[in-house]
């Protein structure tokens, strides 16, 4: 069973770049869950889940006790024990991802429905540096404090929280199943792999494991977004493509007055950068329509009508002027109330290391940091090609990675910056299995040197 558990609808027909992944429960656990369901029957999940908001005293640094000593911060979590059979029912633990935990809890009814069936305890844990779980308050995003925002620290948080709460709630014999979607789904997978002593099973939806590791096509996600609109009709796809092409031509001819009037922009564009921002603003609307393509209205990550991809295609094909249709289609996301008289593309959409957007506020700062310093994808090469001041994409950084790898495998490796950035080294007479090992070593080298460079940054 594969279900979206974080409220983000899987873009249809996701392939390996943004795959739905399930680590199946063990046979004994399945038997336990089936037994519980048979005893209790099916319960109906009420509209509003009955969560209580609590805070957990979490260690600041799980791996370096000299850096922060025994310092702690308050990590938020939500708990629902309405359906739980104390000491017997399983624990359903949501591995919070890049945002306020209430947003995910209120858009993940699947867990509460399943909890009602299985007499489970439900816990939604908020990811460090997101929502109200800021280790250093408003200073959390300064150097060196931001250095504690890592995947390893996040899943260690969850491991500690699971262990302590099970003891406190007399649930030591209750199996723990972790759930997550998208980045949260990746965390669920990592929890099952790294902490099998704590986690009996994991269900991860739309977890981009391979693409994040640089082992897959980084542009597959956008191909699947395109396919969503193409599945409505080929004419819809052609109209969207034609509209963006017309905008490109207007930008090249610097017809900025026409662009401003056509797209109802608050400020007249005056540079190629402004046109680039407008393109991102428009593309983000199509991305979110695909991600939130539910058969019902939602306000998760943006206010959307039911079946927004279908609505978007109907809007694109409604009139004869493609640019006007493009503006009206973007309005499905940005102006659902119809109250905006113009669009400020720099405030409504903030470009960041994640080409699908990072949002706004502290959460966007945290996610932008994670994407820049953690993932290896097309965004990496985008940074390498256009922001040489970013040390993680500068020549000297990757040269050092290259030297370490040559020492490890004792062979000459042809060095090109783009090869290292993508993880796409060209190795002769090496089996595909050995290449995967090499890529893992490459990731480890990048991580080690990243820590070294961040330490240098903190001393500047």
Image: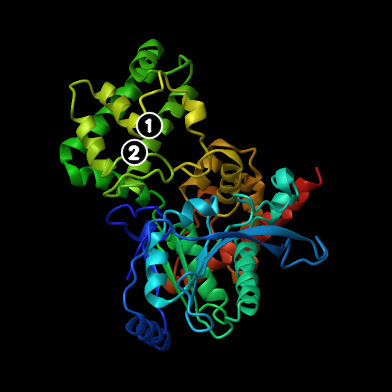
Q: Between marks 1 and 2, how big is the CA–CA gap? A: 7 Å
Q: Position of residue 337 (x, y in %)?
A: 37, 29
SS category of the residue bearing label 2: helix
Q: Which mark is residue 299?
A: none
Task: Classify residue 395 as left or right of residue 216.
Answer: right
Res. 154 in view: yes
Q: Residues within 10 Å of mark 2 (few under 14, many from 20)?
A: many
Q: Position of residue 407 (x, y in %)?
A: 65, 67
Q: Position of residue 14 (x, y in %)?
A: 32, 57
Q: Which mark is residue 286?
A: 2
**Cβ atoms at labels 1 and 2 below 8 Å apart:** yes
Task: Classify residue 47 as left or right of residue 12.
Answer: right
Split into 4 quadrants, where in the image is the C terminus?
top right
Q: Position of residue 231 (x, y in %)?
A: 19, 47
Q: Residue at x 75, y 49 (%)?
A: 144
Q: Residues within 10 Å of mark 1 (few under 14, many from 20)?
A: many
Relative to residue 208, is residue 386 depicted above or below? Answer: above
Depth check: 16 or 261 in front?
261
Which residue lies under the disc numbered 1? 282
Q: Residue at x 38, y 39 (%)?
A: 303
Relative to residue 342, is residue 57 depicted above or below? Answer: below
Res 276 quadrant in image: top left
Relative to residue 70, is residue 24 depicted above or below? Answer: below
Task: Classify residue 210 as left or right of residue 146.
Answer: left
SS category of the residue bearing label 1: helix
Relative to residue 436, is residue 402 depicted above or below? Answer: above
Q: Residue at x 57, y 79 (%)?
A: 198
Split into 4 quadrants, where in the image is the N terminus?
bottom left
Res. 403 in view: no
């Amino acid at each position: 069973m594969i279900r979206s558990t974080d409220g983000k609808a899987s873009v249809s027909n996701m392939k390996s770049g943004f795959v739905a992944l399930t680590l199946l429960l063990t046979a004994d656990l399945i038997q336990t869950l089936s037994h519980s369901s048979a005893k209790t029957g099916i319960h109906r999940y009420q509209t509003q889940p009955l969560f209580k908001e609590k805070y957990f005293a979490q260690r600041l640094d799980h791996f370096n006790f000299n850096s922060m000593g025994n310092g702690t911060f308050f990590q938020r979590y939500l708990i629902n024990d309405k359906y739980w059979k104390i000491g017997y029912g399983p624990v359903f633990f949501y591995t919070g991802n890049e945002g306020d935990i209430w947003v995910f809890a209120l858009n993940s009814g699947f867990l509460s429905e399943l909890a009602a069936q299985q007499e489970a305890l439900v816990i939604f844990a908020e990811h460090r540096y997101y929502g109200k779980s800021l280790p250093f308050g408003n200073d959390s995003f300064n150097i060196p404090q931001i250095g504690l925002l890592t995947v390893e620290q996040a899943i260690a948080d969850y491991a500690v929280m699971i262990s302590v709460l099970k003891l406190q709630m007399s649930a030591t014999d209750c199996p723990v199943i972790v759930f997550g979607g998208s980045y949260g789904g990746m965390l669920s997978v990592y929890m099952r792999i790294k902490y099998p002593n704590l986690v009996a099973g994991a269900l991860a939806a739309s977890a981009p494991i391979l693409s994040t590791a640089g082992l897959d096509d980084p542009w597959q996600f956008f191909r699947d977004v395109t396919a969503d609109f193409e599945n409505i009709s080929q004419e819809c796809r052609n109209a969207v493509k034609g509209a963006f092409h017309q905008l490109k031509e207007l930008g090249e001819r610097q017809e900025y007055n026409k662009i401003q009037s056509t797209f109802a922009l608050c400020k007249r564009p005056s540079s190629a950068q402004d046109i680039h921002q407008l393109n991102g603003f428009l593309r983000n609307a199509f991305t979110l329509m695909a991600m939130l393509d539910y058969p019902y209205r939602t306000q998760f990550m943006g206010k959307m009508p039911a079946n927004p991809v279908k609505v978007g295609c109907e809007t694109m094909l409604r009139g004869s002027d493609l640019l006007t249709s493009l503006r009206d289609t973007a309005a499905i996301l940005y102006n659902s109330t119809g109250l905006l008289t113009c669009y400020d593309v720099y405030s409504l959409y903030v470009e960041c290391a994640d080409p699908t957007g990072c949002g706004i506020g502290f959460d966007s700062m945290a996610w932008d940091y994670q994407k820049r310093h953690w993932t290896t994808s097309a965004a990496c090469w985008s940074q390498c090609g256009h922001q040489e001041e970013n040390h993680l994409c500068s020549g000297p950084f990757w040269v050092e990675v290259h030297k370490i790898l040559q020492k490890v495998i004792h062979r000459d490796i042809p060095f090109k910056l783009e090869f290292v950035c993508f993880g796409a080294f060209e190795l002769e007479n090496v089996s595909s299995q050995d290449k995967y090992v090499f890529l893992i070593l490459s990731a480890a080298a990048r991580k080690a040197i990243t820590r070294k460079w961040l330490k240098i940054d903190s001393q500047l």
